[in-house]
Image: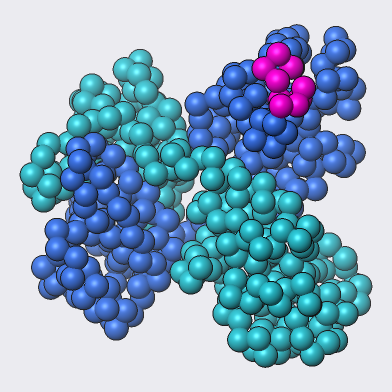
Chain colours: A cyan, B blue
Amino acid sequence: MENRVAYCVSDHTGVTVEAVANSVLSQFPAFEFSLIVLPFVDSAAKARNVAAQIAASPGALVFSTLTDPVLRSILHNARLNLFDVFELFAPPVEGVLGQSATPSGGRTHGMANDYESRMDAVNFALNLDDGLNPERLDQADLILVGVSRVGKTPSALYLALQYGLRTANYPLTPDDLARDSLPEVLLAHLPRLRGLTLSAERLAAIRQVRYPDSRYASLQQCREEITAAERLFERHNLPVIDTTRMSVEEIAARLRLRP
Amino acid sequence: MENRVAYCVSDHTGVTVEAVANSVLSQFPAFEFSLIVLPFVDSAAKARNVAAQIAASPGALVFSTLTDPVLRSILHNARLNLFDVFELFAPPVEGVLGQSATPSGGRTHGMANDYESRMDAVNFALNLDDGLNPERLDQADLILVGVSRVGKTPSALYLALQYGLRTANYPLTPDDLARDSLPEVLLAHLPRLRGLTLSAERLAAIRQVRYPDSRYASLQQCREEITAAERLFERHNLPVIDTTRMSVEEIAARLRLRP
């Protein structure tokens, strides 16, 4: 497998350009790429430094979301293998909109704008983590339910951070699972409940890391809990997501689809 | 201001294509765009549905990260204002690499791969939130310090979720601030400490939301705490980030720059 370095240059965080580079480069499986993100390249001096750094790495690819014409020309003049997001997208979008692009220095509005609501959602997710403060469940956009270690907390935090959704999570304990119905406190909120499940094998592996050789982490215990949880989800007709092969981004994007 | 709808079509979460659309469209400030994300478009039937939905919205823009040739051709044949990330990037990257792209169905590796380490980092950030479990600070990649409500917790969670960095956070209380030195428990970890600060006005506004008209939320109290915290950061020579005008993505990307 051939190794290549790919630089991701941005005048802001670099999150977008890194995602684009990952997405494009995943279409070239014969190569192994080492990504180097160079964020906050927002002056001519920094752009010259970056251009010199990249030029010292022969064969490197360069993805850039720089928009300032001065900074872009510095990269262009350095004779790099440059894939300039702005240059590729601006002309066709200009054609459709009938207006020229106004290089604005890379503000990605729609991100920072909703900062307050996302921070509020994160605080909400923390305050209603793992069944805490159930009297506030009526304020939740979504309530994730499932057995211990099924991935409720990271999913709730990601939904809050990425999408600004006030997401609570509520654990199903073995006591809850022994009953015929979801916990009483959840019944008033059925339309906003989402069930999380995963394979018993995967759950056991996750629990083993924390509590090796415990009954809690045994395959049999995990099987029983998962089976009982899925029966409850079905009884109450909850939308269910099987997270066995999913990243937290994917779980969150799917949960968001039917809010 | 003219309104336009922009669809973001993906066979996966849509996070990348939404980021690209936001970035590109922010260069056209004369328009107000409504973004509609259509994730998990991973079959011909779904692609046909999506194409019909978009065609019913005249003048809409369409950003797509679909890679499967069958799905892409369905969008292409629908005569949309289509900006196809794959079509724009693949040819120039193929030219540099000397190989054809292999449409892989949009797996963005480098994301799902490190799922375990990111989930571990999230659990770590939660377990070491707000000064909890200080005996585990030696396991941290980064330790954020600052006064109450300066943004430590969301920043730590974002660093964990996005970058897999095990990030603790530790609050500076008025008692801590009255001393000449950072809390004893932090002194063994100076190279991994990062100071967070923000303007006293912004801090007071944030605290007011939760505790209106309290001494805690008063501008004078906020000024005193911020001044004392910045003095401590300087005394111990900590890298400091002023979060006043930053999104959580930007804070995290800057903190990650010198890990």
Q: Nearer the viewer, residue B232 or A125?
A: A125
Q: Residue drawn 85% across and 41% down?
A: B132
The magenta region covers: B213-221
Is any part of residue A68 visible from this angle?
Answer: yes
Q: Position of residue A181 (x, y in %)?
A: 76, 86
Residue A119 appears at what percent x and percent y? 59, 43
Q: In which quadrant of the rendered image does the N terminus of chain B lie?
A: top left
**Residue at x-position 71% and y-position 51%:** A126
Q: How many marks?
A: 0
**Relative to A176, residue B164 above or below:** above
Image height of A123 relative to A186, above or below? above
Residue A211 or residue B83, whichever sits in front: B83
Task: Name the quadrant containing residue A5.
Answer: top left
B56 on left or right of A216: left
The residue located at (91%, 77%) in the rendering is A215
B217 part of magenta stretch = yes
Which quadrant of the figure contains the C terminus of chain B?
top right
| Prevailing secondary structure class for the magenta stretch in the rendered image | loop
Q: What is the quadrant of residue B195 in the picture?
A: top right
Residue A109 magenta-highlighted: no
A105, above or below B134, in the image? above
Q: Residue at the spot x=76%, y=61% of the render? A: A135
Q: Quadrant of residue A23?
A: bottom left
